[in-house]
Amino acid sequence: MALVLASGACDLPFTDSEPACEGWKPGDVVITELLPDPEGADTGQEWVELHNPGRSAVDLRGLLLYAARPDGSQERAYLFEASVPVAAGDYVVLGDVRSGAPPAHVDHAYGDTLGSLGNSGGLVGLRCGDVVVDEVHYSGPIRSGVARIYDGRLVPDAADNDDASRWCDAPASASGTGTRASPGEANPACASPLGGSDGGVSADAGVNPDAGVPASTCLSPRMGTSRSLSRPRPGDLVLTEVMADPKAVADTSGEWVEVYALRDVDLNGVILANEGSGRAVLGDSRCLELRAGSYGVLARNGDSTVNGGLPPVLGTFSFGLSNSPEAHALRLSLNEVLLDEVSWMSAATPGVSRQLDPALRDSARNDAPESFCLTPKDVRYGLGDWGTPGAENRPCAP
């Protein structure tokens, strides 16, 4: 394993590259627990826990685990040169074990490369090149033998774990003895959040968690209970189909846009915008849930008796979709972060949607206008227009 020294250590520039980690996005793994001050000597007993919230296994090979002072100075980093797989939904514990076999709760040892985690505060993160996968800033005082945990009632998320109110000191065990921690497993619920003089966790560098962030919870229509929002990240959503000129009903009633989810997400707070001033914020007290592998329809009108017979609509927008042969665009964003965008120049065909070839269904390949085609005329919905709203698109002809 390699020790990578940042500017705070001997003023050596970081020049290593990590080709093995190419393709990582923010939030692909999430920091959920850390133990900066174990009982007794810190050396060899500190650890950091990561969670894979996705639906596929990941491998940490090529990533950098790093730690620094609260202001980012004196950074030290560890390069994962060997394979460290993390199954979907699983946890991995990384420890500073200096010699011998790691204890049972540590899955992988990074040795002494990070030095000691600060007991009065610091930051811990994981990155691939310039992409910060997740980063957590924590403040003191850190209690000896007590881990800092992300609230176990909440879905682990790399944006939501920026919020100090979602963290706490690990509660005492039933026996009331031993280190208070839950390495390698889901965290217990927080009895009360941290904050103020009691310490806490702050937002990623350069992020203001209060700037335009939607409500952090919603009412799940599936469970009937309130839960934390699962916010989409770039690449999680793909714009897949557009009906700009319905024929069965008026444009103001029958225009719609389809979006596909690659991960379980909620669309609460997501903004749909066009190339002009059109802008709609998707909002509801209910969770606007879109499950991985499913399609959601956003429409001018949510009433199926008015909109041409669309399937249930996830959200509505009031701006129009232009039919003319000029530059057009649709964008999805959240908190000023672009999630996906498509553009085209052609005029709309009356009664026929433009659909993304299902073989090109990701947020990079749908950037090319030629990735879309007119929906085949053997595919109708509702009152007879051509399209596949809320369903799998048909392959585009060669």
Image (tube, rainbow, N blue to C red):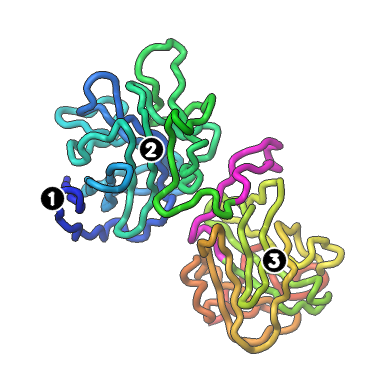
Please say whether residue 133 is one of the residues in the magenta stretch: no
Residue 118 coordinates in the image, percent (x, y): 28, 34
Q: Where the N terminus falls, by quadrant?
A: top left
Q: Residue furthest front?
A: 197
Does residue 186 appear anywhere in the picture?
no
- Considering the whole magenta stretch, tell me its main secondary structure: loop
Nearer the observer, 299 or 32: 32
Label whose residue precedes the other's in the sequence (2 or 1): 1
- Magenta stretch: give its range: 214-238
Could you tell me if the residues under marks 3 and 1 are in contact, i.e. CB atoms within 8 Å? Answer: no
Residue type of the residue flagged with mark 1: Cys
Check disc 3: other Cα within 10 Å, few if <14, some if 14-19, many if 20+. many
In this rendering, position of residue 336 left or right of residue 50: right
Name the residue rendered at 27%, 30% in the picture: 46
Disc 2 from disc 1: Cα separation? 25 Å
Residue 227 coordinates in the image, percent (x, y): 62, 38
Name the residue rendered at 75%, 57% in the picture: 312
Could you tell me if the residues under marks 2 and 3 are in contact, i.e. CB atoms within 8 Å? Answer: no
Q: Residue furthest left?
A: 10
Residue type of the residue flagged with mark 2: Tyr
In the picture of the structure, the residue carrying the numbered disc 1 is 10
Disc 3 from disc 1: Cα separation? 58 Å
Return the mark for residue 138. Answer: 2
Secondary structure of the residue carrying tag 3 is: loop
Please say whether residue 221 is one of the residues in the magenta stretch: yes
